[in-house]
Image (cartoon, helix red, strand yellow):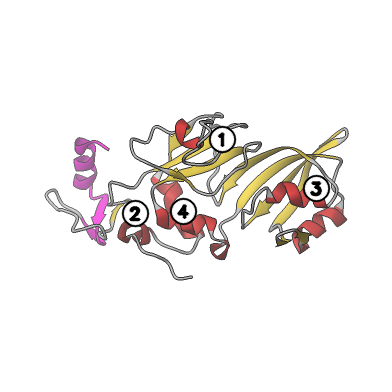
Amino acid sequence: MSRRRAEELIRAGRVTLDGKTAILGDRADGDTAVVAIDGVPLPVRADLVYYLLNKPRGVISTADDPQGRTSVVDLVDAGTRVYPVGRLDADSEGLLILTNDGTLADLIMHPRYQVSKTYVARVDGSPNRAALRRLQQGVELDDGIARAKSARVLSRHGSEALVEIVMTEGRKREVRRMLDHVGHYVSRLVRTAIGPVRDSQLEQGVARPMTVQEVRELYTAAGATWQDAAAGNELDR
């Protein structure tokens, strides 16, 4: 945001600083100050950046790769070092967040905070009600029980179907293994949402800065506040 635009918002009385209407000349005191526009908190720490990427198939979800393969960080021009929040395997596609906000990354990845991830899988065959129920009740994988928060068939096309699965954890290739366990091989897997964040218009291979509202909603979905990011708080386990 330009300085001129910021001054216009302050003059209009739309900016608050620690709950009080800001005036020209006010300064935020330290990293824990709460600045808001129209009641929506803004990050005070200028070093925090957030990007949403639509990961293509074949790109790996790591920050570094000794083999020199294309990584998700190669697709984000952040101007600072960022890290993927969780992973999508190389064969999977869809939304992935890259940030240097460790607090938010922890909230999204840790199963305790129940931030959902929504996937659409193209599978062989068409799961019946019993298979969908098993996915939600839990299936036994080699690394423990895996449960979907929800599972439903979106559409059927000949010998294939599109299945939407919502998860609150992210073990390695978990969705693929779950569907395979109930007899349905996954030929394509796309993550379509992370918590409340969606963007069906974002092209594959493209990353964009996340909006203030999107980041705020992710913190809210995990039962936390943006002040945790501003203060760099470590959350209780």
Residue type at tag 4: Ala
* Alpha carbons under labels 3 and 2: distance apart: 43 Å
Does the segment drawn in magenta span residue 12?
A: yes
Which residue lies under the disc numbered 1? 55
* Alpha carbons under labels 1 and 3: distance apart: 23 Å
Which residue lies under the disc numbered 4? 105
Residue type at tag 1: Lys
The percent coordinates of residue 11 (x first, y second) are 19, 45
Contact flag, marks 1 and 4 (Cβ < 8 Å): no
* Alpha carbons under labels 1 and 4: distance apart: 17 Å
Q: Residues within 10 Å of mark 3 (few under 14, many from 20)?
A: some
Helix, strand or loop for disc 3: helix
Residue range highlighted in magenta: 1-21
Q: Earlier in the sequence, mark 1 or mark 3?
A: 1
Q: From the viewer's perspective, tell me whether residue 13 is left or right of residue 211.
A: left
Which residue lies under the disc numbered 3? 180
